Amino acid sequence: MPYVQRPDARIHWNSLGQGEPVVLVMGLGCSSAMWFRIAPQLARTHRVILLDNRGAGLTRVPFFVVHRVSAMAADIAAVLDAAGERSAHVVGFSMGGMIAQQFAVDFPDRVRTLSLLGTHSGGPWAVQAAAQVRKLLFDKAHLPAEDSLRAMRPYTYASGTPDALFDEDALVRLAHQPGARDYRAQLYALIYWSVYLQLPRLTMPALVLHGLQDALIPPDNGRVLAARLPRATLVELPEASHWLTTDRTDDVLAALRDHLQHHRHRS
């Protein structure tokens, strides 16, 4: 298994497929295994690079209080170096979308395109979830893992999503569930984070995908991102919630493929 040794962390990564590189960055409390609906499909035409964020999966950070977003963005750069890729298309979901934005701000020449799924730009400009949803997000650290997933389901999955799909996701998440300390270290990193003011400087093509039933990161956040990014395309999915990659897998794949195809890298 490939690892990148950073000064303060050992980052696990992997890749599959061949072609233009696409980095997939997962969300809060989830390992890269949660790209299982998307990664194999994209790997038919691209080299898909996956990494476990600090606090998730097989990545190890010996000493930490907070897993800072800027550090997780720098981890992407280290993984690209290890993979022998100067730049890549970057796709981020939820917290992974925040890391992707930070990476684009810190390393703009390494981003071919940016795809942001169910995320926001942070700070006071972010449209907040309802109070009970925010409370549950913090309470999750103290709940049994399976109970926490079921408690969040009404706010993160579309009303029409079958139980079988939720159960498949839950099995993958439970197999790679972080400890409470790692979960909180990721969550606390997001509280004061923001790149809202820097977004107009990002000139790479951007795709913003958001589910209109998302009660965790409300849909207005996607609209804010699309308005702030100079070259953004906004795609809203009425029958998707936060886990849009599960609710509407085919629609998400179609949008990503179209975006990547339209903006193929030219050396």
Image: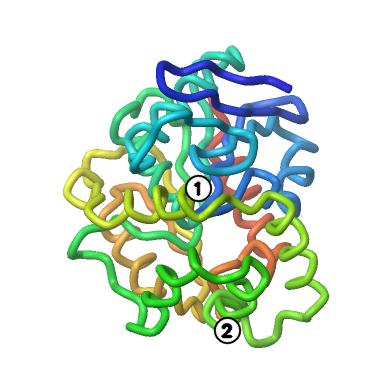
Residue at image location 78% in from the left, 80% down from the top: 163
**Residue 267 visible (yes or no):** no
Residue at image location 64% in from the left, 87% down from the top: 159
Three-letter amino acid code at the position of disc 1: Gly
Residue at image location 61% in from the left, 17% down from the top: 83
Three-letter amino acid code at the position of disc 2: Pro
In this rendered view, identify the residue nearer to me: 98 or 62: 62
In this rendered view, identify the residue nearer to me: 183 or 4: 183
Separation of marks 1 and 2 at Cα, in angstroms: 22 Å
Disc 1 element: strand
- Displayed quadrant of residue 224: bottom left
**Residue 70 visible (yes or no):** yes
The residue to which callout 2 is attached is: 154
Q: Which colour scheme is used?
A: rainbow
Residue at image location 44% in from the left, 76% down from the top: 136
Determine whether 110 is above or below 22 in the image: above
Position in image of residue 192 (x %, y %): 22, 53
| Residue 174 falls left or right of residue 265 | right
Question: How packed is label 1: few (under 14 Cα within 10 Å), some, or many (20 or more)?
Answer: many
